[in-house]
């Protein structure tokens, strides 16, 4: 009987920006490095992922990729796979999925794995169906049961889907000390001054961390904030994130009479952990969500959550235990839930304590172990 080969992995990511998916790639590559797995991360020149990989000593190869049908990029991928004798190509974005399919067509010793992080249905056109139903895909890795359900509805056979929940770095939530504690205190002071979080008692801070795009649906959050009764405790809602909908959302908030009074748009910031330390409540209003690591971060910082039940959010938040869940798009219910949390410090504390314990099952180390099991399963099939 032939011995099962060890994983030799090419992680393919086509994004230049740094968002949740890129953070998951970095966590996975870091975990595999700790376990001695031979791997390369391949990404676009000048990407944030590339900089972070190099800083962490993770091999990173720059590859210009103009789209998922870039034949020159495919040819160079094949050369790289052969040169380094790689046996697994793990595609981490939709464009990587398309490039990976073409790359493995002529490198049969390399098996293709596709991570699926979003719960959007696949397109119904012929090209999209061929892309998702191709027998060249050894496994899809869904980041939640919700994403698995979408893949099944798209016609992907269940035997080709595995789940590895997205994970976070639990060490981030340990108490700070020394210089780190001092720097955090200074950052918090600056944030309080910037967003007028002062007075005795100071206003309660509601936080939202998400890109300003349609599926995050901050429009529903703004409506919910506007509906909170005037006799509720004073609060500020800080929305951290950038995106194509910033101007329309600011216009909506202005029309509702809550811009720079109840709600502030804080933009994209580095060092977002101090924002979480400032929050008293975390709010999310997504229509769709593969899982939602911003919610996991909130849980790690012991925050109660008021959220819509979009996508995989109910797989993280237990309604009535760690937060409140409302139907997608239901601004009235979301506003009621936020008002309940504003009025009860005991409820906020109890929900936060529950979330701090529950989030431990979503460690990025667990994600790495689950993914490595999938790698070994695929390589075992080939023996």
Image (cartoon, rainbow, N blue to C red):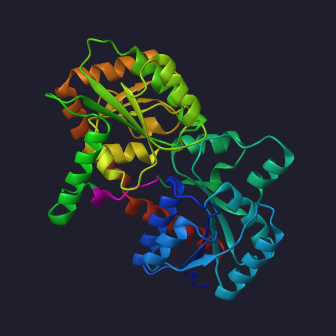
Tell me if residue 271 comes above or below residue 257 in the rendering: below
In this view, the residue farthest toward the right is 126
Q: Residue at x 40, y 21 (%)?
A: 225
In front of the other: 289 or 49: 49
Q: Residue at x 70, y 48 (%)?
A: 156
Q: Residue at x 42, y 17 (%)?
A: 226
Residue 76, by quadrant, is: bottom right
Find residue 347 and report its horizontal and vertical position in percent.
21, 27
The answer to whether one can see residue 176 in this image is no
- Magenta span: 166-172
Find residue 203 and report its horizontal and vertical position in percent.
23, 28
The answer to whether one can see residue 251 in this image is yes
Find residue 46 and report its horizontal and vertical position in percent.
59, 70
Tell me if residue 224 comes above or below residue 312 in the rendering: above
Find residue 357 and report its horizontal and vertical position in percent.
25, 46
Q: Residue at x 18, y 65 (%)?
A: 179
283 lies left or right of 43: left
Q: Does residue 68 show up magenta in the picture?
A: no
Which quarter shows the N terminus?
Answer: bottom right
Residue 368, by quadrant, is: bottom left
């Amino acid at each position: 009987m032939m011995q099962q080969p060890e994983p030799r992995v090419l992680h393919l990511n086509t994004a230049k920006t740094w968002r949740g998916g890129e953070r998951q790639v970095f966590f996975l590559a870091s975990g595999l490095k700790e376990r001695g797995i031979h791997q390369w991360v391949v990404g676009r020149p000048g990407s944030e992922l590339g900089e972070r990989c190099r800083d962490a000593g993770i091999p990173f190869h720059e590859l210009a990729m103009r789209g998922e049908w870039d034949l020159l990029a495919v040819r160079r991928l094949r050369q790289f796979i052969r040169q380094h004798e790689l046996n697994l190509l793990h595609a981490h974005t939709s464009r990587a999925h398309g490039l990976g399919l073409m790359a493995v067509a002529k490198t049969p010793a390399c098996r293709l794995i596709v991570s699926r992080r979003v719960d959007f249905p696949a397109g119904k056109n012929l090209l999209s169906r061929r892309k998702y139903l191709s027998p060249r895909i050894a496994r899809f890795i869904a980041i939640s049961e919700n994403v698995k359900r979408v893949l099944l509805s798209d016609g992907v056979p269940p035997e080709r889907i595995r789940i590895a929940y997205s994970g976070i770095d639990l060490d981030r939530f340990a108490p700070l000390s020394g210089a780190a504690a001092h720097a955090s205190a200074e950052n918090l002071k600056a944030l309080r001054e910037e967003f007028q979080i002062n007075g005795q008692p100071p206003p309660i801070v509601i936080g939202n961390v998400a890109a300003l795009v349609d599926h995050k649906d901050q429009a529903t959050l703004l409506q919910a904030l506007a509906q909170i009764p005037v006799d509720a405790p004073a609060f500020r809602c800080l929305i951290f994130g950038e995106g194509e909908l910033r101007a329309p959302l600011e216009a909506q908030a202005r029309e509702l009479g809550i811009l720079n009074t109840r709600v502030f748009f804080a933009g994209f910031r580095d060092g977002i952990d101090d924002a979480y330390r400032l929050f008293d409540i975390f709010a999310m209003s997504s229509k769709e969500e593969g899982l939602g690591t911003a919610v996991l971060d909130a849980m790690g910082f012991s925050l109660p959550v008021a959220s819509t039940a979009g996508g995989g959010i109910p797989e993280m938040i237990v309604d009535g235990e760690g937060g409140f869940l409302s139907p997608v798009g239901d601004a009235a219910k979301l506003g009621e839930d936020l008002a309940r949390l504003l009025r009860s410090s005991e409820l906020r504390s109890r929900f936060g304590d529950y979330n701090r314990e529950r989030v431990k099952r979503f460690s990025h180390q667990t994600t790495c172990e689950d993914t490595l099991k999938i790698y070994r399963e695929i390589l075992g099939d080939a023996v």
